[in-house]
Image (tube, grey):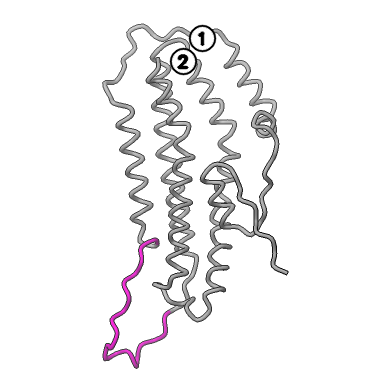
Amino acid sequence: MDSLPRPAFRGPTFIRLLARLTDATLPQGGPAPAERLSQWIDWTRAVVLSKALDAKPAEAEHGAQVLDRDEAAACAKTRATLLASITGAPELAVPQPQAVGSSDDADAEPPAPVDFAPFRQRHLALQRSMLIATGRLRGDLRDRLAQRSAETARLAEVDAVMEGALSPREQALLGAVPALLEAHFERLRAAAGTAAADPSAAWLEGFRRDMRGVLIAELDVRFQPVEGLLAALRTH
């Protein structure tokens, strides 16, 4: 009897992509966002957040220098640079096939087995780049908000507290992605059989496409707080 198809997982693009690449069946439901958030923030962070929310907004400094800078353009440029580093990663490019009929074919050594290690190193490097770039943008936007008004200054303070509270959890979850990709890589390689060592084989191109998709979706996730701060600047 054929096994029942896995139900489609509904959720953000990043989570849906990871669900598609794993053998595990993910639950459709779960705790409400507020309940899950309460599990991630310990009581000391909760106290700091409460103080930031309840405190009287501090007045923005009179005469504070506001840089003449297009924040949206700067964020878009950073995002485009990170996206280019993903799409242009050499490990994710399809190698050109070897010419057929070469005089050295008889003496050529068989291709070495394709290994996941270079993909892991590239993935970790790209994650570090995204973390550094988005963290810098987030700090710059908070500085601009702090100079805009008392209300936006409080928003900047709340965002700083939330970043400090949630970043460890976020990094732990995102740090598990390479292991999920490696398991997906191994399943595809095992299913490829004799084509497993061919660097231009269809299974490997499929994996490269999947890895690119996951990285681009992670970039979207990392830019969500940046886009929220940008929206606050536009409306205040």
Q: Position of residue 183 (x, y in %)?
A: 58, 63
Circle 1 SS class: loop
Over which residues does the magenta segment extend?
92-111
Q: Image check: 169 left or right of 27? A: left
Q: Position of residue 217 (x, y in %)?
A: 47, 46
The amino acid type, in three-letter code, at marker 2 is Ala
Residue 187 visible within the image: yes
Of the pair 149 and 211, the residue shown nearer to us: 211
- Whether 194 is drawn above or below 229: the answer is below
- Quarter of image, res 172: top right
Circle 2 SS class: helix
Residue 153, disc: 2
Contact (Cβ within 8 Å) of mark 1 with mark 2? yes
The amino acid type, in three-letter code, at marker 1 is Pro
Q: Position of residue 6 (x, y in %)?
A: 65, 56
Q: Residue at x 56, y 48 (%)?
A: 16
Dominant SS type (magenta)? loop
Q: Which residue is mark 1?
A: 57
- Report crowding for label 2: few under 14, some 14 to 19, many 20 or more residues within 10 A (C-alpha): many
Q: Residue at x 53, y 71 (%)?
A: 189
How far apart marks 1 and 2 lie (CA) works out to 7 Å
Pick out the residue farthest to the right. Answer: 1
